[in-house]
Amino acid sequence: MFWVQFFSRHASVQKILAISSVTRCTSKSVKHGQSAWLRSIFFNSVKYYPTKLVLGIETSCDDTAAAVVDDTGKILGEALHSQNEVHLKTGGIIPPVAQQLHRENIERIVKETLCVSGISLDELSAVATTVKPGLALSLGVGLEYSLKLVDKYKKPFIPIHHMEAHALTIRLINQVEFPFLVLLISGGHCILVVAQGVSDFLLLGQSVDIAPGDMLDKVARRLSLTKHPECCRMSGGKAIEHLAQQGNRLHYELGAPMRHHPNCNFSFSGLRSKATRIIMQKEKEEGLQEGHLLSCVTDIAAAVQHAVALHIAQRTHRAILFCIKSGILSQTNATLVVSGGVASNQYIRRALQIVTDATNFNLLCPPPRLCTDNGVMIAWNGIERMRAGSGVLHSTDGIRYEPKASLGIDISERVGEVAIKVPSLEVSLNELSAINL
Ligand code: KG4
Ligand code: ZN
């Protein structure tokens, strides 16, 4: 009994348990002597009994991911197959290709997750799966596979909203109480919401056109960054961040969009057009055809990244001021959570830090691997819903995936009507330098 308590309270031992399990799954990667020793200690003498264990499955876009998380927030195991390399080659996600890759990988990813976790399907409390929003063909693979699992093993099913999962991930790592402000910035989404409860959100603003990750991916593609030796395997956003560190953003002026719209909505397609015009002009000057690397890619990357950061920071600043003014959040000890794939960008985080410092908010971001799509956030959302007693289904009749789904109650018009003037932080924001990050 002592050992059970001792081990269950020590996260580092949980990690060893996971490593030890990995040795059984992929035995080549760990030295045999050590793995045999770990196995003999942990698997023969320790059995770990959490109250709830949820398997999370994510296939909404281009990552096939799964994880097992318990009700204390421990990640027992996870696995992920990224389709990024394939989509980089085809110049974007082709839905039937994504669907086929999910089909080819989902069983392996789930098995690997369970194997690393040392958990059998019978031991699970529930299966949680992303059912909205996302690519129809991709969502369908995860849902179909999950429904077969829950039917065969007689488990409850928890349908998950992908954006809700991104928003709640922080509570797996930090003790953040509701309500808090959330900025979700990814390849498919850009929203500002107040999280008031596990399934209770207020939508303050969203992108009126494309998401920032989508814009960065498109600019990166137009710059042919997959041909750059330093970032040929990176997502567009990551490649822009990487190159921006070596560039001078002051060589190009893109400006922040929507300055005369005093709301919390976003727009990124204008920035994309401006970036395209600059690229075309430079190609002309350097006598290059589209598809060849420009000599000034780092400067363009830095200017684009700065404009995106500035825009996101200004809209988020207004959202913070609105929340304080309307009493939705208190002025003391309030929190801004930033998540989604684009939130792993350190430059954008620094811009947001300037805003939260000026407004006395705490800024919290999950670590980058939990900002991009992953199975852990889905499993954790399942745990949150089990705890709240909300959305845990014992019959899956009529369950469908939904490619389009908004999050929470939309109060964005009210935000626009209040028309809060945002004090200029331009000086501080302009001091942001990628080189000094
Ligand atoms: O959340 P995510 O994994 O998937 C969804 O879109 O839901 O986000 C992927 C997006 C891509 O557009 C990718 O280019 C962007 O996140 N991204 C980044 C960075 N890493 C990934 N954008 C800016 N800076 C990064 N470091
Ligand atoms: Zn996502």
Image (spheres, rainbow, N blue to C red):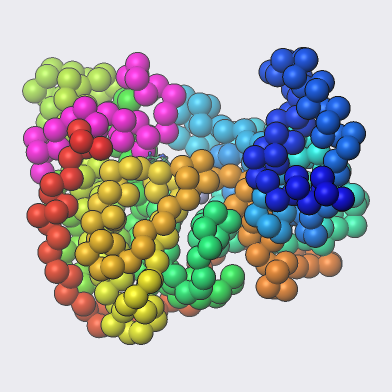
Q: What stretch is highlighted in magenta?
A: 228-253
Residue 251 spot, x, y in % from top left: 9, 35
Question: Against 6, is 331 above or below?
Answer: below
Residue at position x 70%, y 50% in the image: 9
Residue 419 locus on image (x, y percent): 22, 79
State the image quarter where residue 25 is shown.
top right
Q: 218 or 146, which is in the foreground? A: 146
Front residue (pair 312, 4): 4
Q: Is residue 432 left or right of residue 22?
A: left
Residue drawn 84% across the image and 67% down it: 395
Q: Is residue 189 left or right of residue 307?
A: right
**Quadrant in which the C terminus is drawn:** top left
- Residue 63 image offset from top left, x and y in percent: 58, 39
Reply yes or no: does residue 235 show up in magenta.
yes
Asked if residue 322 is positioned above or below residue 56 in the image, the reply reads below
Residue 311 visible? The answer is no
Q: Nearer the viewer, residue 354 or 31?
A: 31
Residue at (68% x, 46% y) in the render: 10
Determine the residue positioned at 83% across, 31% down.
41
190 within the magenta span: no
Residue 109 appears at what percent x and percent y? 71, 35
Establish if 184 lies above or below 414. Answer: above
Q: In which quarter of the image is ligand 1?
A: top left
Residue 226 falls in which quadrant of the image? top left
